[in-house]
Image: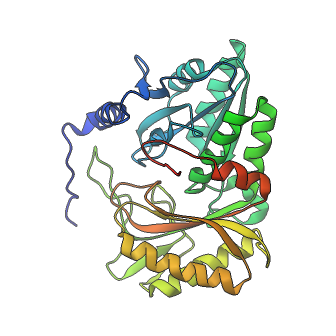
Amino acid sequence: MARPKKLINDPRAVVTELLDGLVLANDGRVKKLDGVDALVATHVPDGKVALLVGGGSGHEPLFHGFIGRNLADGAACGQIFAAPPPDTILAATRAVNRGKGVLYLYGNYAGDNMNFDIAAELAADEGIEVRTVRVWDDVAAAPPERMQDRRGIAADVYMIKIAGAAAATLGSLDEVVRVAEKARDGVRSMGVAVAAGSIPETGQLTFELADDEIEIGMGAHGEPGVARRKLPTADEIADDMVARLLADLPFRRGDEVALLVNNLGATTMMEMLIVYRRARKVLADAGITVHRSDVGTWLTTQEMAGLSITLLKLDDELKRYLDMPAESLGYSRA
């Protein structure tokens, strides 16, 4: 299989150079900390509960593209598809802390869990209160009775939006955690891949898939899903994915949801809109109302082709935080 083409310089410098570019593209609203791969907002208000996100690079615009108004205050950045180290997380924690505590929000992966936990302990030794909410929305990763073993995928988008708005509004770390946990417990996602992404440093594909096959339930790094089969129609894909999501929470007739269709990297807007339109029909037939829609590119795996669908069950409180204006390089809503 041909090596993927990429517009890069030294493959070992991609993280440093992408972060430099991201800082410049933010026009002064974001800065990089000295000596570590961490970005923070140039202005974090005093007396604010801080939201720190993070994870491996290579998933742009997550996580470091989500620093901004009613979103994250900072991001700890790892190498490509690798967890950020504890010293990077701790430096970012110090930089965003304004005396009201710091919420760590990130995807549920072993390396991230270990390193963020170490950083939280080090921060506590310095008198900084830290709480953690892990995102575990991938219904393909484990059955409902093992929810805490599930991976975090595109629900990060809605989780950062809601937690960021809550952190900008509420004066208590406990209250921000409560809101974030409510959102986490009501969100489900599933992905499907039709072609692999690659690792910039090596050029190696993250998995192998025949030209006429898809992987149902593929993870954000190319982790195996729940089924591999011949390529079906877009409607068949949407029917299967939404049915699995609805059954998992479960979502019920009369529920109100936010619906997100996320591009894994190389899928066209044409394809996403075709799937989105079918997902809306399935939800309507199930008596479920879509309060808000997001169709775009947020959690990617380089040039992986495919998409994920996320459903977030809403109540009045979650709608309020979700609908607050947001502005960042990676995600903005008026």
Q: Position of residue 90 (x, y in %)?
A: 57, 21
Extreme front residue here? 334
Left or right: 131 as drawn, with respect to 235? right
Q: Is residue 95 above or below residue 305?
A: above
Left or right: 39 as drawn, with respect to 325? left
Q: Position of residue 197 (x, y in %)?
A: 35, 59
- Closer to us: 252 or 230: 252
User: In percent of the image, x 30 and y 35: which residue is there?
Assistant: 21
Q: Is residue 37 above or below residue 166?
A: above
Colour scheme shown: rainbow
Q: Across the whole image, how many numbered discs are drawn on residues?
A: 0
- Closer to us: 297 or 135: 297
Q: Is residue 274 above or below residue 53?
A: below
Q: Position of residue 18 (x, y in %)?
A: 32, 37
Q: Is residue 309 above or below residue 183?
A: below
Q: Position of residue 293 (x, y in %)?
A: 57, 65
Q: Find residue 242 and report its image quarter.
A: bottom right
User: In percent of the image, x 72 and y 77: which residue is there?
Assistant: 288
Q: Is residue 240 visible?
A: no
Left or right: 211 as drawn, with respect to 5? right
Extreme top residue here? 126
User: In percent of the image, x 52 and y 23: which residue is there?
Assistant: 43
Q: Find residue 214 and report its image quarter.
A: bottom left
Q: Quadrant of the N terminus?
A: bottom left
Q: Is residue 136 visible?
A: yes
